[in-house]
Image (cartoon, rainbow, N blue to C red):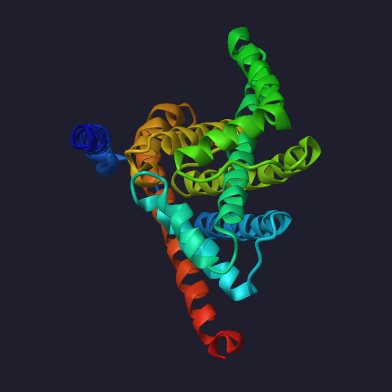
C-alpha cells in the first residue's frame, strides 16, 4: 500500500509538471514574438518586498515561539527558521518541522512542534482571510455568489480559530505525526491577533508578484488586490498538494489560469517563472547568511 501511494504521488507530480511544461512550451513562441521590454527597476522593489516578507515572518515567529517557551540565541534562531524554510522543497511538507526541531535542539520537541503548528495555522488562516475579504469587495459587476462565498469564508475562518475547535484540530495533527496532544492553546484573542499580523505577510507576497508583473507588463495598482488574491490562492493550493515540493507546478498552473485577466499570457509566463526564481533566491540567500552568522558567532564558538 505504501509503495502504491508513493507511485500515485509521483504520478500526480509528473502530471502537474507535464501540464505546466506544456502550457509554458505552448507560449514560448509567443514570448519570442511578444514585444515587451523588461523593466528591471521593478525587480528591485519586488526583491525588497520578498526580503521584507521573510524577515517579517521571522520576527513574528520569534514572538510566537516565546509564548511556548521556545528560545535560542538570535543567530541560532535565524538559522533554524531560514533553513527550515528550505524544507518546503522536499515533498511531504514534514521536512520543515524536522529542520525546525533540529535547529531548536535543547528545547522541548513538543513545544517546538506546537509552536510551528500554530504558526502554520495562523499564516494559512490569514492568507485564506485575505482571499475571502477580497472576494467580498470585488467590483459590483462580479457575480453575487462569489461575494457570498467570501463572506462565508470569513465567518468560517474566524469561527474555526475558536480554542474549542482549534484544540481538536491541533491534537489531531499532532497524533498524525505521532506526538502527544496538548492541553492548552493560545486564547481566541491571541490567535486572532497572530492571524491579523500574518495578513501583513500575505500582502507583502502580493507585492512581490505585482512588481514582477510590472517588470514585464504595466499593471495598474487597481489590480493589486486581484493579483494578491490569485497568488495567495495558488500558494494555498500548492501547500495542499503534498506531492509537489513547495507547490512547484501547482502554484504556477493556478497562476497561469488566473492572471491572464491582468496581462498577456507571455508576460504571465515570464512573471510567474521570475517570481519563483526570485523567491527561491531570497530563501536560499537568507539560509546561507543565517548559517554563516551562526557559525562565526562568538557565542557558538565557546
The reply, left or right, for residue 91 in relation to residue 228 is left
In the figure, residue 8 lies in which quadrant? Answer: top left
Which quarter of the figure is the N terminus placed in?
Answer: top left
205 and 63: which is toward the camera = 63
Which quarter of the figure is the C terminus placed in?
Answer: bottom right
Picture coordinates of residue 250 (x, y %)?
36, 35
Most extreme residue toward the top is: 144
Picture coordinates of residue 42 (x, y %)?
53, 54
The reply, left or right, for residue 298 in relation to residue 159 is left
Decide if residue 285 is in sight here.
yes
Picture coordinates of residue 102 (x, y %)?
47, 65
Give the residue at x 61% y 15%: 149
21 and 166: which is toward the camera = 166
195 and 34: which is toward the camera = 195
Give the residue at x 63% y 8%: 144
Give the residue at x 59% y 89%: 298
In the figure, residue 224 lies in which quadrant? Answer: top right
Q: Is residue 291 above or below residue 169?
A: below
The reply, left or right, for residue 278 in relation to residue 108 is left
Q: Is residue 188 above or below residue 60?
A: above
Amino acid at each position: 500500500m505504501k509503495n502504491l501511494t508513493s507511485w500515485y504521488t509521483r504520478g500526480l507530480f509528473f502530471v502537474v509538471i507535464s501540464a505546466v511544461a506544456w502550457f509554458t512550451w505552448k507560449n514560448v513562441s509567443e514570448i519570442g514574438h511578444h514585444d515587451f521590454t523588461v523593466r528591471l527597476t521593478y525587480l528591485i522593489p519586488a526583491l525588497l518586498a520578498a526580503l521584507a516578507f521573510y524577515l517579517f515572518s521571522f520576527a513574528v515567529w520569534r514572538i510566537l515561539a516565546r509564548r511556548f517557551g521556545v528560545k535560542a540565541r538570535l543567530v541560532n534562531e535565524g538559522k533554524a527558521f531560514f533553513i527550515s524554510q528550505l524544507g518546503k522543497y522536499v515533498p511531504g511538507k514534514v521536512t520543515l518541522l524536522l529542520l525546525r526541531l533540529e535547529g531548536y535542539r535543547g528545547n522541548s520537541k513538543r513545544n517546538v512542534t506546537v509552536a510551528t503548528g500554530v504558526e502554520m495555522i495562523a499564516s494559512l488562516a490569514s492568507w485564506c482571510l485575505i482571499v475571502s475579504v477580497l472576494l467580498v469587495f470585488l467590483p459590483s459587476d462580479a457575480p453575487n455568489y462569489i461575494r457570498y462565498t467570501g463572506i462565508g469564508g470569513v465567518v468560517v475562518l474566524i469561527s474555526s480559530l475558536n480554542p474549542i475547535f482549534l484544540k481538536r484540530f491541533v491534537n489531531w495533527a499532532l497524533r498524525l505525526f505521532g506526538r502527544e496532544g496538548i492541553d492548552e492553546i493560545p486564547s481566541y484573542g491571541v490567535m486572532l491577533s497572530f492571524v491579523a499580523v500574518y495578513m501583513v505577510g500575505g500582502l507583502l507576497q502580493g507585492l512581490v508578484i505585482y512588481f514582477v508583473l510590472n517588470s514585464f507588463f504595466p499593471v495598474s495598482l487597481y489590480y493589486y488586490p486581484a493579483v494578491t488574491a490569485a497568488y495567495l490562492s495558488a500558494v494555498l493550493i500548492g501547500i495542499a498538494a503534498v506531492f509537489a515540493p513547495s507547490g512547484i507546478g501547482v502554484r504556477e498552473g493556478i497562476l497561469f489560469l488566473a492572471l491572464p485577466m491582468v496581462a498577456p499570457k507571455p508576460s504571465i509566463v515570464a512573471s510567474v517563472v521570475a517570481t519563483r526564481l526570485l523567491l527561491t533566491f531570497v530563501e536560499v540567500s537568507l539560509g546561507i547568511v543565517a548559517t554563516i552568522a551562526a557559525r562565526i558567532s562568538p557565542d557558538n564558538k565557546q
